[in-house]
Amino acid sequence: MAGQLSATGIFGTRRAEGRGATADWMSGLCPRLWDVPLHRLSLPGSHDTMTYCLNRGSPVSRTQSRLLHFLSKAVPCITQPVVLKWSVTQTLDVSEQLAAGVRYLDLRVAHEPGGSRRNLHFVHMVYTTALVEDTLTEISEWLQQHPREVLVVACRNFEGLGEDLHEYLVTCIKNIFGAALCPRGEVPTLRQLWARGQQVLLSYEDEATVARHPELWPGIPYWWGDQVKSQALIRYLETMKSCGRPGGLFVAGTNLTESLGYILAHPAQSLAKLTLPALPALSAWVREQSPGPGPSCTNIIAGDFIGADTFVTDVIGLNQKLLRG
């Protein structure tokens, strides 16, 4: 297929495809790419990173529609399994996603109603069993084992968080990542981050909290198409590209999205059944993209069901185009 690239071509030495290549792919990049700012590289990301551990006994998120809340109370034995099928976007856990090469994590933080005051979870229609503090610790421990890999971590949503919980969360972030956090400023290169011993750019989608903490970066734009068909999503992404890329880090989301009406009309389906047949078309679009400074260039590309196809290596492979010319 035209435009398809091998990820191995961007490494300074030829390496076999597999977990070793993807777990440490940044450290193995061609040295010519070490001085390219992160917003001009191609980085693979996972959309709704934490949905592999949704709690089957969880209530429906407070942000969902009145109709869904009514159905979950009236017929929970029917509603709950359907909601779960349409909420799961990932099957690999966070360490497995990182080992697969993911370098952008989409963390939707929430405080579950009735939960312990300091126990923060993640959310996507329902809440996760995983706690935020435990997950951030797992990410930090993975990074310690891979000291030349760099992550863009996006904390988003913040359902049920007031100022006190924002401050608690930021304290956890600082305590867990410590000196590995890169303070906001100009988007750094890999060489700069390695020299400083920094591995995490943490985007935080609450402006007031960001203003109080220089360790946090503002929210990263996410191109979300809100489409159920792959061709409609691709048209949306092409329209966004035609308007020009943002100046800094940004995400192009290749995730399909269903409405409640669609779910109710297709109760026997699931997000996986919707997404997996669409992956070839979405992968073909990914392989046609190019990172760099141009107005139509891409940066972070996020997807669902990491590991189901060649998405991660396709996104990494786009960096080879930066070596031309």
Image: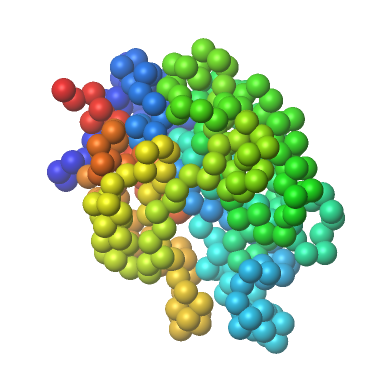
Image quadrant holding the N terminus, namely top left
Label tally: 0
Outermost residue on the bottom side: it is 74
Q: Nearer the viewer, residue 230 or 185?
A: 185
Left or right: 129 with respect to 143? right
Left or right: 277 with respect to 206? left
**Is residue 306 shown to the viewer in this render?**
no
Colour scheme of the rendered structure: rainbow
Q: Residue at x 72, y 60 (%)?
A: 160
**Is residue 73 shown to the viewer in this render?**
yes
Image quadrant holding the C terminus, namely top left
Residue 187: x, y in percent? 45, 28
User: On screen, 303 above or below 187?
Assistant: below
Q: Residue at x 34, y 15 (%)?
A: 31
Q: Quadrant of residue 236?
A: bottom left
User: On screen, 262 above or below 57?
Assistant: below
Q: Nearer the viewer, residue 235 or 141?
A: 235
Q: Residue at x 70, y 87 (%)?
A: 74
Q: Residue at x 60, y 77 (%)?
A: 65
Q: Nearer the viewer, residue 317 or 250?
A: 250
Left or right: 98 with respect to 16? right
Q: Quadrant of residue 250?
A: top left
Residue 308: x, y in percent? 41, 50
User: On screen, 54 above or below 199?
Assistant: below
